[in-house]
Amino acid sequence: MRFLDIIEKKKNKLALSDEEIQFWIDGVTNETIPDYQTSALLMAIVLNGMDDHETAKLAEAMMKSGHVLDLSSIEGIKADKHSTGGVGDKTSMALGAMVAACGLKVAKMSGRGLGHTGGTLDKLESIRGFNCYLSEDQFKRQVEEIGLAIIGQTGDLVPADKKLYALRDVTATVNSIPLIASSIMSKKLASGADTILLDVKYGEGAFMKTIGDAKVLAQAMIAIGKKLGRDTMAMITDMDQPLGNTIGNALEVQEAVETVRGKGPEDFTELCIRAGEIMLIQGQLASTKEEARRQIKEAILSGKAFEKLVQMVQYQGGDVEQIKNTDLLPKAKFVTEIRSREAGYISRIHSMQLGILAMKLGAGRATKSDPIKYGVGLKIGVKKGDRVKRGDVLCRVYHDEDLDKDWLEEMYNSFQYSDQVQDPTPIVEAVLGE
Ligand code: URA
């Protein structure tokens, strides 16, 4: 097989065969195909697409490029969820604790933050001593024993994706539905869970800017999951404003703890409960959404969801006192209130900009090697549609260094006003794959 012919074929808008896709991914993994040829094929895929069959084959070949976890020794259905990334997204730890408290086995591998989006691992590591790097045996044992583990990817998972993603990043070929869908799903498939719930975000702070694009990505990922025998569903959710009220690692852990204790913000609580309904049905622990909702609310009200979170932190070596009393989590040196200069209804909250402002405080990374400051971040005091007066608090900024003028100006510009009443946006726009 000549790789040149494969590039030529995609350039001419033809579908690649299973053997051709396998040949490509083998060549990427073994480094026998040079980057310039892979880059040419990636660009041809961006321009000419792939059908569902090719996309599923690509995901499968990538999944098999490295180690694939076998969770079959753990009794029952093993569940995973994945968010396409957003601002203030602390869903995994709160949702994981809620559904694990209802008896579901949650085996989750998470990532780190980059740019305006945060990462679950960074958030969890704001808890003193928390260990995100369990061995595979420890991971399985923990899922078996307590039903919940959230860790970083183990060493050799989907090496082809690491190589392809690094190339896509520098060749303007990230933005392609088949490439994004196969990249995300290859990692989910290799993580070994039986059921996958995808939280596909749309809006300013998300990868997909419109509901339509988010649905197309979700359908592509569902098609891959189903072709490869995994029960896969997706929610399309709003990222046109930050999720919940906090952005920043320790602040988000605190909000996740409040939410599992039933005192979280409305939008975030609703997102967790709606996601939990789907996961409990996928896990065959409930037959209707109403029944699942009852179970989750019971887990929150009884304190079982909170106990599950404490148990996970304990198993992974974290300081549980910081979860029992979140005032003990890392703290920034200063708190500054940002007050509204106008009156009106909040019409837009620029989540991407707020994510970048939080990153500049040290809550996130501009490049992969940047250190994180766990205590810094933003606590936003308003939601889209709220009516505010001049002088009302828009945001509390938790920071370690002085805030400069440009930063403050961008902060003020992150909120827009209207004199018209604003229609609320539902946090869950649609559920697909039912
Ligand atoms: N996240 C991934 O894991 N892969 C992509 O291609 C895009 C987002």
Image (spheres, rainbow, N blue to C red):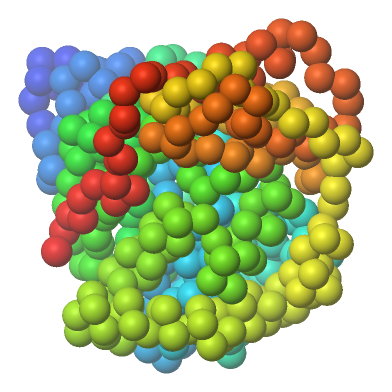
* Vertical position of residue 209 compared to residue 162: above or below: above
* Vertical position of residue 413 compared to residue 212: above or below: above
Give residue 357's position: percent from left, percent from top: 66, 24
Viewer-nearest residue: 340 or 404: 340
Q: Is residue 171 visible?
A: yes
Viewer-nearest residue: 272 or 145: 272
Name the residue at 62% across, 65% down. 258
Name the residue at 71% across, 16% down. 408
Give residue 150's position: percent from left, percent from top: 58, 66
Name the residue at 55% across, 53% down. 90
Snapshot quadrant of residue 424? top left
Snapshot quadrant of residue 229? bottom left
Name the residue at 57% across, 66% down. 263
Q: How many marks?
A: 0
Q: Is residue 112 left or right of residue 183?
A: right
Q: Is residue 252 left or right of residue 350?
A: right
- Quarter of the image for the N terminus: give it: top left
* Vertical position of residue 377 compared to residue 96: above or below: above
Q: Is residue 252 left or right of residue 107?
A: right
Q: Is residue 8 visible?
A: no
Give residue 198's position: percent from left, percent from top: 33, 54
- Quarter of the image for the C terminus: give it: bottom left
* Vertical position of residue 176 compared to residue 286: above or below: above
Snapshot quadrant of residue 323? bottom right
Viewer-nearest residue: 269 or 146: 269
Give residue 12's position: percent from left, percent from top: 10, 15
Q: Residue furthest top?
A: 406
